[in-house]
Each structure stands twice: as structure tokens, then as C-alpha cells.
Image (tube, helix red, strand yellow):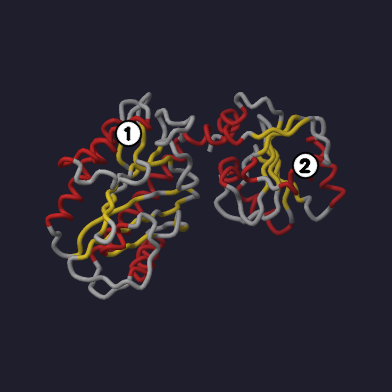
């Protein structure tokens, strides 16, 4: 990990001297971004970053875990059990302009920081979002591995399906397969939907049992070294009828259109609009209004790093972005189809990972 490059990206245009991150129950994604730590909970720990260096304020509980993973650019300070020592070290923020992530900082922590008399406190959430949208080589490598694990796990489970299995059982099989293939965890709770349940984009697995010729939708993602994948596959357990076969072909065609349009400089929201129009106008409007969510999103330390296919400041595509592309059509009471793949934006276009 090239820490100084990440720090430079975050501090660019921030007009702050230091950035403070606080972990509540577990490490925040931004903490992971600035440390690259793979293990440890660091509950109640502070990370203070300057443009050149970082200081981790920790305790006996996490000191050696942090030391074993820290580079020379991260100074690990065992101070949380000693108020005098903590006050002495934390006083480096006095008179400095401090940046925080408002989404990860409670009022109590904000007021605690103020006690050390910084010159001012500013929200730098947008700096983190912008910096994390374009991945470096190590991030891309981790995402590639997460995607590979996810795809193999889905294929493995697909081959072992049998009538009578419940959605919950299949979801457990997917999660187990990903762990067996080297995942450190899951990026989100695995979605498995049979038959008409596939018409619900965020259906949570239940006791519905698999029947012959059912639609099967699996939406899942492995996490590898903190980085996420997000893959959806829809298929039929048996023989698809004419309607389902048409939906499958339409959604795959829509996804390919989207992927072919993705390249540096392209406007992700306009691509979404074009794909939506394509689906809405298919066969005289047969599926108009049946594509009911965004076309995709950025992936990284979080499964939804940013919603670049929406009306956001980050909708213009850049080289080094990693995106999930997921068109779908949904018919209430019948079923739905979603196909999702993760892509890397290269200098000339999108590469399916």
C-alpha cells in the first residue's frame, strides 16, 4: 500500500492540517483505507493523520495487533489506558485545522475533539469518497480476488442445487463456499430468491423451497482483504419458459450495452438513462417501468462505495474506477431477472473482472 499517495488524495483541496477518524464498535471503511489493516477491531481507537504520517491511539488490547500490521508511516501509541499519556500525545491537534467524516463521527466524539482546542473542525467526507472512487493497484488486486471467489462459489452452488432446498439453505451454501475459497467474509447478506420472490430486488432468504423450473436469483459478494465483490446471477432450475427466456436475454443485452458505453469521461447517469430507455421501449414497451433501481454503483471497501450511476457529483467515469453493473426487470407475482458483474475502468473502456 502506498500510504502517502492515499493521504495526498484525501488532503487535496481539504484546507485542513490533520484528519481524525474514530472507530466505534469496529474499524470504519476510511480507517481501513488509511491503515490497510486486515485484522483487529480497534474499538474506541483514534487515528490522527497528517499529510505525511499517521498516529494510532490504541490500548493494550490492540497494540500488538496494530504493531504487527503497521508500516513506518503509522506510529502506534499505547495511550488509551493512560489519560495523562493520551492527553500529552493527543495535544498535537491543538491549534490545528481538523478534518472529520461527519457520517462516522458522533456528537460525543465531536465534542471530545473540541476539548483539545483545534483551530476548527471541518467535514471532509467528500474528500474520502472522491479519493476512494479511483483504486490503486493493491485495491484492484483485492477486488479481482473477491470477484473470482464469488463467481466460483455461485457456480459451485448452482451445480449442487436440488428440489426441496430452501432459500436459507442455499444462501448458507453460498456463504460457506466463499469462505472455503478464501474469502475473509461476506460483503453483505446474501440474497437468494426462488420463483416469484425474484421480483423483489432486496428479498431476504426465507423457507421457500426450490421447485422444478423455478427462477433462481443469487446476489452475493465475497470480501477479500477488506475489499468487496457484488455479483448477481439469475437462471432457471430446469427449463425456462418463453417469458423467462426473453427476460434473461433482454437483461443480458442491456448489461452489455451499458458495459460497452463505460469508459473514461463518460457520464454514468446518462448511460443509466439510455439503458432504461432501451428496456422501457423493448417490444413496444412490454417491460416499461419494470427496471426499478439504479444501473449500478462503485465497489471497494464498501459494497456501495458511491452511487455513480445517479445524480451525484461523482457520476463521470474515471480510469481506475471499479463498478458493479446490474440492470434488471421485475414482474410482481411472477419473478424477476437481474444480472450483475463488476468491471474495472481501463484507459479505453470497461474490463469485466
Closer to us: 237 or 281: 281
Closer to us: 42 or 126: 126
Closer to us: 102 or 334: 334
| Residue at image coords 76%, 31% | 120
Q: How far apart, in angstroms, are the residues tagged by discs 2 and 1?
A: 44 Å
Label 2 Cα neighbours within 10 Å, binned few <14 / some 14-19 / many ≥20: some
| Residue at image coords 28%, 32% | 274
Which mark sits nearer the N-terminus, 2 or 1?
2
How many numbered tags mark residues here?
2
Residue, disc 2: 113
Q: Position of residue 178 (x, y in %)?
A: 38, 60
| Residue at image coords 34%, 46% | 292
Q: Position of residue 133 (x, y in %)?
A: 47, 35
Circle 2 sits in a helix, a strand or a loop, which is it? helix
Q: Give residue 111's quadrant in the image.
A: top right
Above or below residue 324? Residue 210 is below
Above or below residue 16? Residue 83 is below
Q: Give residue 296's quadrant in the image.
A: top left
Residue, disc 1: 273
Amino acid at each position: 500500500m502506498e500510504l502517502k499517495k492515499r493521504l495526498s488524495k484525501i488532503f487535496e483541496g481539504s484546507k485542513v492540517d490533520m484528519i481524525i477518524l474514530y472507530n466505534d464498535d469496529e474499524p470504519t471503511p476510511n480507517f481501513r483505507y488509511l491503515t490497510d489493516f486486515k485484522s483487529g477491531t480497534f474499538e474506541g481507537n483514534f487515528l490522527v493523520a497528517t499529510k505525511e504520517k499517521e498516529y494510532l491511539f490504541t490500548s493494550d488490547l490492540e497494540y500488538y495487533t496494530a504493531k504487527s500490521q503497521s508500516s513506518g508511516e503509522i506510529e502506534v501509541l499505547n495511550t488509551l489506558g493512560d489519560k495523562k499519556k493520551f492527553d500529552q500525545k493527543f495535544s498535537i491537534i491543538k491549534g490545528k485545522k481538523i478534518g472529520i467524516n461527519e457520517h462516522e463521527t458522533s456528537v460525543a466524539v465531536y465534542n471530545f475533539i473540541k476539548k483539545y482546542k483545534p483551530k476548527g473542525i471541518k467535514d471532509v467526507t467528500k474528500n474520502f469518497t472522491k479519493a476512494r472512487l479511483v483504486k490503486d493497484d493493491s485495491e484492484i488486486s483485492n477486488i479481482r480476488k473477491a470477484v473470482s471467489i464469488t463467481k466460483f462459489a455461485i457456480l459451485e452452488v448452482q451445480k449442487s442445487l436440488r428440489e426441496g432446498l430452501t432459500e436459507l439453505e442455499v444462501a448458507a451454501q453460498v456463504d460457506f463456499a466463499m469462505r472455503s475459497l478464501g474469502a475473509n467474509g461476506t460483503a453483505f447478506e446474501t440474497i437468494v430468491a426462488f420463483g416469484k420472490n425474484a421480483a423483489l430486488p432486496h428479498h431476504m432468504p426465507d423457507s421457500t423451497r426450490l421447485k422444478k423450473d423455478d427462477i433462481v436469483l443469487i446476489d452475493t459478494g465475497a470480501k477479500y482483504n477488506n475489499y468487496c465483490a457484488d455479483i448477481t446471477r439469475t437462471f432457471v432450475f430446469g427449463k425456462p419458459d418463453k417469458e423467462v427466456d426473453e427476460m434473461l436475454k433482454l437483461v443480458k443485452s442491456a448489461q452489455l450495452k451499458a458495459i460497452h458505453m463505460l469508459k473514461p469521461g463518460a457520464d454514468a447517469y446518462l448511460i443509466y438513462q439510455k439503458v432504461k430507455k432501451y428496456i422501457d421501449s423493448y417490444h413496444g414497451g412490454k417491460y416499461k417501468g419494470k427496471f426499478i433501481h439504479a444501473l449500478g454503483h462503485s465497489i471497494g471497501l464498501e459494497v456501495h462505495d458511491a452511487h455513480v450511476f445517479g445524480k451525484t457529483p461523482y457520476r463521470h467515469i474515471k480510469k481506475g474506477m471499479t463498478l458493479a453493473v446490474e440492470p434488471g426487470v421485475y414482474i410482481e407475482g411472477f419473478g424477476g431477472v437481474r444480472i450483475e458483474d463488476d468491471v474495472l475502468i481501463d484507459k479505453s473502456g470497461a474490463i469485466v473482472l
